[in-house]
Image (tube, rainbow, N blue to C red):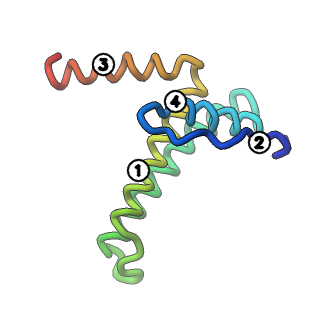
């Protein structure tokens, strides 16, 4: 795969982030060196990598490693958490073209269960 076909950057996500997720998914699909099951599994594993980066940023923001000291800020943690969310939504989009509807249904169920309706 090549980088010859690069879609234009999406407009800022604002209240509707799904066009940006679709654009990122399309870009990844176009530029992935893997396909099929291997691509799917690697995309799911990417979540673990991103969660590890959250942990690294938290440790770095609190100075828990005395050898390194404070290496990150809480703003870095925020950015890493955003990367987890984006990666998860792209992984969901990889599983289904109906990612928006699947996510909305699931969020509705979780909200109703947790907040009582």
Q: Nearer the viewer, residue 39 or 77?
A: 77
Residue appearing at x 57%, y 19% in the figure: 96
Element class at badge 1: helix
The image quadrant that residue 36 belongs to is top right
Question: 6 left or right of 72?
Answer: right
* Above or below 63: residue 32: above
Tell me the number on the disc at residue 81: 1
Name the N-terminal-most of marks 3 and 2. Answer: 2
Q: Residue beneath label 3, please?
A: 108
Tell me the number on the disc at residue 97: none
Q: Residue beneath label 2, please?
A: 6
Q: Residue beneath label 4, please?
A: 18
Element class at badge 3: helix
| Alpha carbons under labels 1 and 3: distance apart | 22 Å
Residue appearing at x 27%, y 23% in the figure: 110
Residue appearing at x 48%, y 22% in the figure: 100
* Above or below 78: residue 114: above
| Alpha carbons under labels 4 and 1: distance apart | 18 Å
Question: 28 left or right of 78?
Answer: right
Name the N-terminal-most of marks 2 and 1. Answer: 2
| Alpha carbons under labels 3 and 2: distance apart | 34 Å
Pointer 2: residues within 10 angstroms few (<14), some, or many (20+)?
Answer: few
Residue 103 x %, y %: 42, 23
């Amino acid at each position: 795969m090549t980088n010859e076909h690069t879609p234009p950057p999406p407009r800022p996500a604002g209240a509707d982030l799904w066009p940006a997720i679709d654009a990122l998914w399309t870009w990844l699909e176009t530029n992935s060196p893997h396909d099929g099951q291997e691509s799917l599994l690697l995309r799911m594993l990417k979540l673990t990598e991103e969660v590890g980066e959250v942990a690294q940023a938290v440790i770095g923001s609190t100075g828990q490693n005395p050898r390194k000291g404070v290496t990150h800020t809480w703003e870095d943690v925020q950015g890493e958490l955003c990367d987890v969310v984006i990666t998860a939504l792209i992984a969901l989009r990889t599983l289904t073209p109906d990612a928006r509807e699947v996510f909305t249904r699931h969020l509705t169920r979780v909200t109703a269960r947790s907040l009582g309706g």
